[in-house]
Amino acid sequence: MTLFRNILLSLVAAAILVVGGWGIWRWATYPVKPDVAHVDVNESIAFIGTNDFNRLFESDRKKYVLAVIDRLHEKSFPELIALGTFNESHHREAAANVRSLEGREEIEGAMLRLILDKFYEQSPAVRSVYLSGLVMMDQAARSKGRSGAIPTPDRLRKDMAKIIGRQSPQTVARFGQFLVDVEQHRRQMGYGASY
């Protein structure tokens, strides 16, 4: 009995040492993330595109991305569009890292709300210019046999249902209005329905 007890105590002590050692190592090497509230938002986006971001715990990565999206509310719609053009390589890397997160619907929903809110803050004339650009990009992609920029009903059903289903009624209504506006604009430009 004493031998069994000593072996058991030794195993428990070894487990505590291993777990404790891992915890100390993880704490000592855990990436230091830029403070979203105090650095330029582009620096925060650049951090999302790094391997250090990927070394954060999943919950910390999600919180960080949501904090960056909150900071993006300070940007105008044209500034958001400029960010979305991926002119800098770290924007593409950041987007890839966010896409790799499991359960990213909350992040995609926050981004959708941000874009819709900023889009509908624009005057009708400015919205018309952006809609024209979107329709032309969609048409160019479709003419090359690629998926268009405007989601088809099948894509909405498969990809967007999880995101839209978790949004407020106001966001769902705005998204529906956006799709209606795009379709009306397509017809005004002489194109048929997008699907």
Image (cartoon, rainbow, N blue to C red):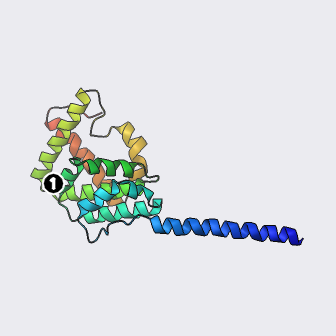
**Residue 32 vertical position relative to residue 139 in the rendered view, above or below:** below
* Res. 55 image quadrant: bottom left
Q: Can residue 113 be seen in this view?
A: no
Placement of the C terminus among the 4 image quadrants: top left
Q: What residue type is labelled 1?
A: Pro
Query: Is 188 on the left-hand or right-hand side of 97?
Result: left
Secondary element under disc 1, as helix, strand or loop, is helix
The answer to whether 132 appears left or right of 94 in the picture is left
Counting every numbered tag in the picture gives: 1
In the image shown, does 99 or 138 lie closer to the viewer?
99
Q: Nearer the viewer, residue 154 or 64?
A: 64
Identify the residue shown where x is 40% and y is 52%: 163
Q: Label 1 neighbourhood size at 10 Å, few (<14), some (14-19), many (20+)?
A: few
* Residue 46 at x, y percent in the picture: 29, 56
Q: Which of 192 and 50 is in front in this view?
A: 50
- Direction right: furthest residue: 1
Q: Mark 1 points at which residue?
A: 78
Residue 57, image x and y in percent?
47, 61
State whether residue 47 appears in this view. yes
Question: Residue 144 at x, y = what percent?
Answer: 25, 27
Image x and y of residue 30, in percent: 44, 65
**Quadrant placement of the N terminus:** bottom right
Residue at left offset 23%, top offset 36%: 138
Residue sitting at x 25%, y 55%:
115
Q: In which quarter of the image is residue 191?
A: top left
